[in-house]
């Protein structure tokens, strides 16, 4: 979900202003050349930097959520110490290569889909304000998830492996094995339903909370919390550190609401890797099994504290990198 938080935060940015008409060749045409490609690269690079920063926490989250037998008795911080001791420092980054392949298109798709859905909802349905942001964000998140889900499946399988007990030798081998042994193409979409059900409230609440905090902050304390936009001095935007704080709060609230679906999705994605595989074939059976054997705090919400720790630094890196990339690719 952290990937969704970073992409959702990027997608809340104001759309690029229309370029002024200029005389002669060049001017707006030159500036708009390959605009979507440059936007795609900016969002993708920002997402990759953010996810690499919190990759060790992502690895530990997968191990704790699925109760890996090597680490199931440990907490978040003790697991962060135990993984390097058992698997070396790079063990904290296991599965990160597949994550990079996934997060690059994920951020770009969600960003572009959000703008498309926002325009569509406004023009076709006449809906605006927070509801329009909630609907567009939810739809964009689900679109990005569906498009990149097989990559997330492979990333989770690689992250769950422990040194000396490898089922897959790499990304390509994992794709081939899952396709051959788990039902072909449909094997890559195990756990998609809880992901979709979790993404709708997650993305919706993220956009709603972030938008509300932003509007309330600028309305009541414009001088303290805001500054003139570099693109349009007549428009107030949140200061960078306030923007990051609002995004972190929005992500934390949304994560709390949707987290049980995230735990269910991870277990279904791991499939035959888990010994209790036959008891977790459907979303309902998986949630029932987790709740029955581990309860709410140590089952459905296991690893939630880790997600809170990941939220703020992930957002900080995503926003900072994206702003740098916007300047580098002349998107402002």
Image (cartoon, rainbow, N blue to C red):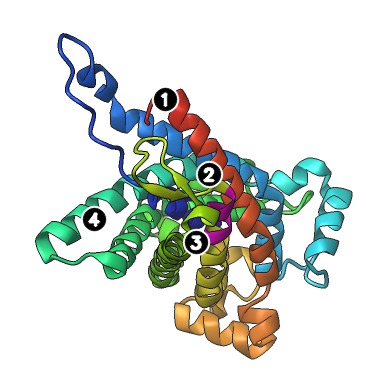
User: Does 72 lie within the magenta span?
Assistant: no
Instruction: Specify which label sits upstream in the sequence, 4 or 1.
Output: 4
Look at the image and give the residue range highlighted in magenta: 241-246
Q: CA distance from mark 2 to mark 3?
A: 22 Å
Q: CA distance from mark 1 to mark 2?
A: 15 Å
Instruction: Specify which label sits upstream in the sequence, 2 or 4.
Output: 4
Which residue appears farthest toward the bottom when viewing the image?
292
Q: Which residue is mark 1?
A: 329
Q: Which residue is mark 2?
A: 319
Q: Are marks 4 and 1 in contact (CB under 8 Å)?
A: no
Query: For the residues carrying marks 2 and 3, which lies nearer the camera in this image?
Result: 3
SS under mark 4: helix
Instruction: Specify which label sits upstream in the sequence, 1 or 3.
Output: 3
Q: Are marks 1 and 2 in contact (CB under 8 Å)?
A: no
Q: CA distance from mark 1 to mark 3?
A: 32 Å
Q: Is residue 237 above or below residue 124?
A: above
Dominant secondary structure of the residues highlighted in magenta in the image = helix
Left or right: residue 218 versus residue 155 is left
Q: Dividing the picture into quarters, in which one does residue 72 lie?
A: bottom right
Left or right: residue 98 versus residue 196 is right
Q: Which residue is mark 4?
A: 117
Residue 228 seen by the camera: yes
């Amino acid at each position: 979900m952290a990937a969704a938080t970073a992409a959702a935060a990027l997608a809340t940015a104001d759309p690029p202003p229309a370029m002024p008409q200029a005389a002669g060749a060049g001017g707006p045409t030159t500036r708009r050349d390959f605009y979507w490609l440059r936007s795609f690269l900016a969002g993708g690079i920002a997402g990759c930097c953010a996810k690499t920063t919190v990759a060790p926490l992502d690895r530990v989250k997968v191990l704790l959520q699925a109760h890996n037998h090597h680490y199931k008795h440990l907490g978040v911080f003790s697991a962060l110490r135990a993984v390097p001791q058992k698997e070396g420092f790079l063990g904290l980054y296991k599965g990160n290569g597949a994550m990079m392949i996934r997060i690059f298109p994920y951020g770009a798709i969600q960003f572009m889909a959000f703008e498309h859905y926002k325009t569509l909802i406004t023009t076709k349905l006449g809906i605006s304000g927070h509801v329009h942001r909630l609907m567009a964000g939810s739809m964009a998140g689900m679109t990005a998830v569906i498009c990149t889900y097989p990559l997330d499946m492979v990333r989770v399988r690689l992250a769950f492996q422990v040194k000396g007990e490898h089922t897959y030798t790499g990304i390509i081998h994992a794709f081939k094995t899952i396709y051959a042994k788990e039902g072909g193409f449909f094997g890559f979409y195990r756990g998609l339903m809880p992901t979709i059900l979790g993404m709708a409230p997650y993305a919706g609440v993220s956009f709603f909370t972030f938008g509300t905090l932003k509007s309330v902050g600028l309305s009541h304390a414009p001088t303290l919390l805001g500054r003139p936009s570099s693109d349009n001095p007549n428009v107030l935007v949140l200061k960078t550190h306030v923007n990051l704080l609002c995004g972190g709060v929005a992500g934390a609230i949304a994560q709390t609401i949707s987290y049980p679906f995230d735990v269910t999705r991870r277990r279904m994605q791991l499939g035959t890797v888990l010994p209790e595989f036959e008891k977790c074939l459907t979303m309902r059976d998986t949630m029932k099994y987790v709740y029955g054997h581990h309860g709410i705090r140590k089952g459905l919400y296991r690893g939630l504290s880790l997600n809170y720790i990941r939220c703020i630094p992930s957002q900080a890196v995503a926003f900072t990198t994206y702003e740098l990339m916007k300047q580098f690719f002349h998107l402002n």
